[in-house]
Amino acid sequence: MTQNPIPRALSILFTSQTRALLMGGQACILYGAAEFSRDIDLAILVSPENLDHLRAALKALQAEPIYFPRLTEEVLRRGHACHFRCRAAEGLRIDVMGRWRGMGEFSELWERRIEIDLPEVGQVAVMAVEDLVKSKKTQRDKDWPMIRRLLEVDFYRHGLDASTARVRFWLAEGRTPEILQVLAEKYPEFTREAARRRPLLSEALAGDAASLARMLREEEDQERALDRQYWAPLKEELERWRRQ
């Protein structure tokens, strides 16, 4: 049986002094929302020193750039992703980003991170579930079931006696009609407050499951459209760079 290359790659990346957060599928696995992922996604601090640390780790993994563009400060600050294939880790793919739609600076994400000690790896900095949910609001079909699963796992892990901050997080981001209705029944005041920013919660308060499900689909469609708008100029920029 072929040994899983992911623990070795994570060990090299997170002992290289690179300031990075694990996100994407591997983070979803650690939160219990996914069973399998083929690659590693990293959010990194964009600075000359940190990129030097990352390049050293990629060199140890015999990582070769794939697709386009090259790994530079300018590229990452503009919101592009850089992609690598690791020859020393059975062709494992690593994707790196330094900026994201609708999310704060890396320093804010770093403050909210969680630290997990993994066997064969050591200490790994993982993007907070609140930020991971936001990072998954893309135009891709596969990301939306994962958002729902992340929130369901978080809800059932903490239960209805969770902190006020947790309840407000679920009301702001929840995608399961049944859970939103349970929250509305248990926390009507919080739900009315959250409904001022997220009107579909009024349907949860009214107990109208069909209308709530419809508005959740509309909300998803709006987020997908916003993601397409965000990436359109970046795609045009990539094409310009390729031609040059």
Image: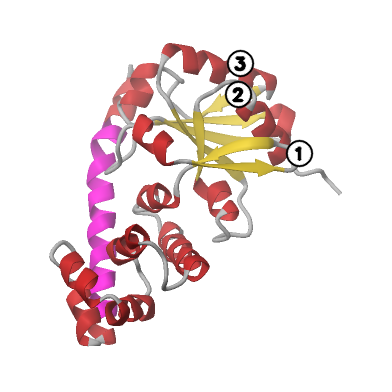
Mark 1 crowd level (few <14, some 14–19, many ≥20, 10 Å Cα): few
Give the residue type at disc 1. Answer: Glu
Quarter occupied by residue 72: top left
Report how far apart the C-alphas of labels 1 and 3 lie in the structure: 20 Å
Please, what secondary structure does the residue beneath circle 3 have? helix
Please, what secondary structure does the residue beneath circle 2 have? strand
Identify whether 102 is placed above or below 162: above
Give the residue type at disc 3. Answer: Ala
Identify whether 19 is placed above or below 34: above
Query: Residue 202 location in percent, x, y?
Result: 17, 77
Query: Residue 200 location in percent, x, y?
Result: 20, 72
What residue did someone put label 1 on?
Answer: 120
Write the residue at 29% across / 82% down: 185
On screen, residue 64 versus residue 114, left or right, reads right
Residue 217 belongs to the span the image colors magenta: yes
On screen, residue 60 versus residue 37, left or right, reads right
Which callout, 1 or 3, points to the residue nearer the camera?
1
Please, what secondary structure does the residue beneath circle 1 have? loop
Q: Which residues are magenta?
A: 212-236
Write the residue at 47% across / 61% down: 150
Quarter occupied by residue 62: top right
Sequence-wise first label, 2 or 1: 2
What residue did someone put label 3 on?
Answer: 56
Residue 136 belongs to the span the image colors magenta: no
Mark 2 crowd level (few <14, some 14–19, many ≥20, 10 Å Cα): some
Q: Which mark is residue 64?
A: 2
Report how far apart the C-alphas of labels 2 and 1 lie in the structure: 24 Å
